[in-house]
Amino acid sequence: MLKLLALDRFTISLFVMVLLASFLPVSGHAAEVFATVTNIAIAILFFLHGAKLSRQAIVEGILHWRLHAVVFAMTFLIFPILGLMAKPVLVPLLGETMYWGFLFMCFLPSTVQSSIAFTSVAKGNVAAAVCSASFSNLIGMFITPVLVSIFIFGQSKHDYDPTRSILEIGLLLLLPFIAGQVLRPVVFPWMQKMPSIVKKFDQGTILMVVYGAFSGAVVAGLWHQVSLLTLLYLCIACSVLLTVIMLLSLYIPKWLGFNKADQITVFFCGSKKTLASGVPMAQILFAGQPLGMIVLPIMIFHQIQLMVCGIIANYWSKQHSENNDVKAK
């Protein structure tokens, strides 16, 4: 049955994390410790990616401007347009406040660790994914508040200084990546002896982020503020949005003539929205607003995108292995 449903251990683990967070959420001091451990895991993941990639691959990834332009357009142009077009349908179903959250989600940058993780699992262009996802988050610190002030508030009501967030991203992601590059001559030979270690850190980090983020929302009383019918409408809206954006992310790079590895990178980087950066930004931009209602759409969308991308990434990985086996024969 699991095989027919295209479910594997990782996808099942994602469901388990959501259920665990719903019934046994981490909170208080334990949540702070867990967040620290999660950040350490993310730093180790980027250190391993830095050690894994050759200098030539990184340079090629940085210079691949056409790919980055497509991901940027998907993230900050097509997503917002779809969110704005959905307003006449979603406001009566979700209410104005939750629609704000849905639109805010469309304004957010792409994910970093999960985009890279899924690209790696699916055998895509990891170097380009690192550059594209990191650039998306950095530029999103400036673009997202502007879009929120224009299309949600109508005018800027909050001062937003992205300097601290940019520094935190640099310390958490870029610095370990550079350290991995510097130590690559020492670390990479060791990694070759254990080729599955990066994949395990990819998947383990995603599971930790899912559990920690969902726990925070549950502790804040999320399930006491939203009716089941509204939650159903929101799940349907997020699923429809993800379906549309994934189809566009799948076919646009094909129409533009990208190779298979780059198509995979655009698909995973261009179809995602970040939860890790989204919640802190929401706390700043929507001060005084019902934050639980604002962040619920990105919480739901994030879970759906991870589960769907987990299935697709593993399918493409198996397909890649089968193709290599055929070529070997």
Image: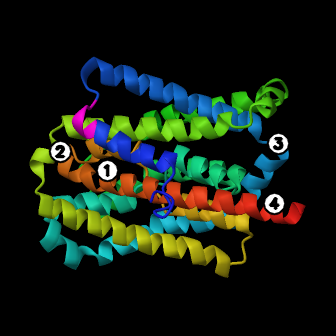
Q: Furthest-bottom residue in view?
A: 255
What kind of residue is marked 1? Answer: Met
Q: Residue 311 in magenta?
A: no
Of residues 28 and 60, which is closer to you in this image? 28
Q: Which mark is residue 299?
A: 1
Q: Earlier in the sequence, mark 4 or mark 3?
A: 3
Q: What's the magenta region?
A: 21-25
According to the image, label 3 marks what residue? Answer: 55
Q: Earlier in the sequence, mark 1 or mark 4?
A: 1
Is the residue marked by circle 4 packed among few (<14), some (14-19), or many (20+) residues within 10 Å? few
**Labels 2 and 4 touching (C-beta < 8 A):** no
What kind of residue is marked 2? Answer: Leu
C-alpha distance separating marks 1 and 4: 39 Å
C-alpha distance separating marks 4 and 3: 28 Å
Above or below, 188 against 156 in this view is above
Q: Tag 1's secondary structure?
A: helix
**Labels 1 and 3 touching (C-beta < 8 A):** no
